[in-house]
Image (cartoon, rainbow, N blue to C red):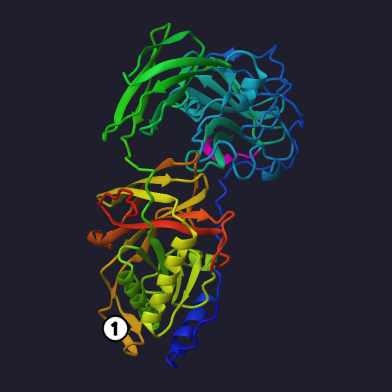
Amino acid sequence: MKRLNEILPAACVCLAMLFASCTKAPEPVQENEPSGQENDPSGQGDGQEDVTFTPEDLQMVDLGLSVKWASKNLDAAAPADAGGRFAWGELKAKESFSWDNYAWGEDMSKYNADDGKLVLDPEDDAAQMALEGYWRMPTKQEWEELKSTSNCSWNWETKNGISGYTVTSLRNGNSIFLPCAKAATEASYWSASLSGNAVRSAYMLTFDEGKTSVLISARKTGLFIRPVNGAEFRIVTPAATIMHNTETLDVEVVSSLEYHITSTPDWIEEASVEELGLGRKMHHFNVSVNETEESRTGVIVFCNQDNQCVPFSVTQRQNQGVNWNKEFFHRSLMMRFTATWCGWCPYMADAVKVAQSTLPGKIVPLNLHASDSDLAFSQTNTLANQYNIKGYPTGIADGRAEINNTSDSNYTASVIVAAVKETEQYYPVTAAIGLNSSISGSTLNVDVTLYLRKAEDYKFTLMVTESGIICPQADYHTNSYVNDYQHDDIARISVTAAKGDAISSPGEMSVVEKHYSTTIPSSYNKSNLKLVAYVQRAFGSQTEKSSGSYGGYYVDNAVVVPVGQEFKPDYAE
């Protein structure tokens, strides 16, 4: 689109400053790759295509700890042999390690933020799949237990020309040897534990002469494996939170002993048990619908033949009360890219206010200040690049329609109103948003409930804005700076990714619940903070009306709610 040419000579100052600051693309964000052992440059991995470890001479060494340790590494011919190198969660030793040949890909198709898995499943544990019995890879906690100087002594020595540590129990004097590869003076061993803060990485034990550490390494990295053996009795996921209308519940138990269920809440009933193999069972339960407005919590207790008991805690949410038979009330998102140095920007601010008065309650404002503005927002460049912003001010209605500025605020307001009505005409709303927030000290907690009518591709964005900020503003209404200019609805914090977090809808008429927390700087006025939340929906097969090429999504619905107030979905009249 071309800008209207109602440009006053004074605009040159603003535009010169603009293009000096906005023509430079923002620096790309580099993903931090965790430290750790990378590809083996010496090619000392054994290169086997399959796990061919033979356990005839494998011994269980009792160090007086929670598990027994293997006498040698996986794929090793002898205790002083380092064996093969494995990527985390792969069953085959190999020589070359990269994201391109990693089993779960660079996008982490398993063991990611969505599936919530923090420990390798048995079928992805190289030790468990190669050996009979209760052999498996050690967890992070078991490496830390072995590493503790109150449990074991670690002595650096050489056996058969191989350097490594002899680890001796301080409880019973038994020992194991952890070798390096040939001619190497350091080594790293995988655990079965994923890094919860960085799903591209998993925990490992790494050492050289004089130092041992439990750190994280990229999952693609080739490391050694030392199996452990221990009878287990545990619940894979010890707790769950379910929706009010969830009718079934699955609980996976891993046990080497016989066990039974001793108690369940009166609203949960055992239905069936499924044998999964490798000591695992999946228990299926029927759950009654919670019709109340209060959540409820119960415990399912499993006890084995040695009278050891493990609890599974389940919380069922209250009835969310959404009426799928009614049409959700629609609100449009009006982004305004602005800056304190831009004299034309107050004109569009006025236009947004006029549009809001024309369509009461229908427009959610979000003001994004440039990186060199006095009210700079850290994510403005990210969104400016997405929406191809070439000059300030520029508006984007519903993530699809560009709103150009003019010196006639009433005219600009009419363009905004037309864009909002076009959204409602061609894109019937499919999402509603529920918010509940509170501040404790400097921590803002937000519970979000998304009601998604269609099984579509969605994204969700949550931001914190502040109003009532007094800050000087260039203003061509007066041809000068206004020192006591009041700025409202200013983007401060992007709680989610600025472009939105992907939301996977399980089906039509689904409810997705999220919890977020963020820190509020002391310089912000907490009483003037609001939450701006919006759901983006992929155009899909829908015809794009007056839409730019902004990434294939438009804003389906938006809300703005003062922090500390609860907001429930509302409906069109």
- Residue closest to the far left: 527
Image quadrant in which you'd find residue 483: bottom left
Which residue occupies the foreground of this view, 33 or 471? 471
Q: Give the magenta range.
A: 211-221
Mark 1 surroundings: few (<14), some (14-19) or many (≥20) residues within 10 A: some
Q: Main secondary structure of the magenta part?
A: strand
Residue sitting at 38 percent across and 51 percent down? 328
Image quadrant in which you'd find residue 533: bottom left
- From where the camera sits, is residue 230 visible? no
Which residue occupies the foreground of this view, 72 or 561? 561
Which residue occupies the foreground of this view, 303 or 265? 265
- From where the camera sits, is residue 527 visible? yes
Q: Position of residue 110 (x, y in %)?
A: 58, 36
- Is 54 colored magenta in this rendering? no
Q: Position of residue 161 (x, y in %)?
A: 72, 28
Q: Position of residue 454 (x, y in %)?
A: 49, 46
Indicate whether 474 appears above or below 135: below
Indicate whether 171 appears above or below 531: above
Residue sitting at 49 percent across and 84 percent down? 4
